[in-house]
Image (tube, rainbow, N blue to C red):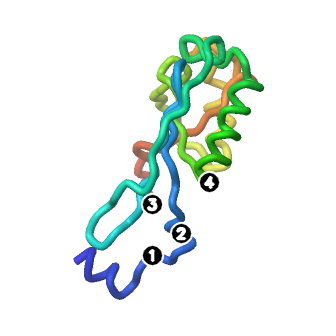
Amino acid sequence: MTSLFSKFFPTPKYLTRPAVGLDISDQSIKFIGLERQPGRLAVAQYGEKSLGGGIIESGLIKDSPALIAALVGLKKEFNLSDVMVSLPEEEAYVVRLTLPYLKPNELRGSIELQLEEHIPLSAEEVVFDYEILSAPVIEQG
């Protein structure tokens, strides 16, 4: 059913821009770009650029200008535009919170107030996002 629907209502081209996945480690930057071909995904481009010692150590950026220069060089050399990047595990936290019912515009502020109870960083030091896993059923009547 999905392919029949897609056949008659294809995703607009501007929503299917190609993107490249980046993997940044202590030693290198690796990338791969996929493209849609009829009935499958295919590798469009891939590559790797070594990083000098001391730029990233144990997942922490120690030399930002050198990392920026490496990324800019990679962008120019391979004509990269849109990229997706993953963070190393050492720099990410997943927290599951249970909150009372809140209005949607109150959620972010409530979560931000509780961050320091669950992670060893202040709210000013982090960038966070959230996902609602389940919402309470509110009975009317």
Q: For label 1, count other residues whose C-alpha is less than 10 Å away and answer few (under 14), some (14-19) or many (20+).
A: few
Look at discs 2 and 3 and give the one toward the viewer.
2
Of helix, strand and loop, which one carries label 4? loop
The amino acid beneath tag 2 is Leu
Of helix, strand and loop, which one carries label 1? loop
Between the residue at mark 4 and the residue at mark 1, the CA separation in whole angstroms equals: 24 Å
Q: How many labels does the image show?
A: 4
Q: If you read the primary sequence from the N terminus, does the residue marked by circle 3 or circle 4 appear first? A: 4
Between the residue at mark 2 and the residue at mark 4, the CA separation in whole angstroms equals: 20 Å
Q: If you read the primary sequence from the N terminus, does the residue marked by circle 2 or circle 4 appear first? A: 2
The amino acid beneath tag 1 is Thr
Between the residue at mark 3 and the residue at mark 4, the CA separation in whole angstroms equals: 60 Å
40 shown above or below 97: below
Point out residue 129 in the picture as x, y percentages from the top left corner: 58, 38
Image quadrant in which the C terminus is located: bottom left
Tag shown at residue 11? 1
1 shown above or below 133: below
Residue at 72 percent across and 25 percent down: it is: 66
- Please indicate whether residue 71 sits to the left or right of residue 84 in the image: right
Residue at 41 percent across and 80 percent down: it is: 10
- Please indicate whether residue 137 sits to the left or right of residue 56 in the image: left
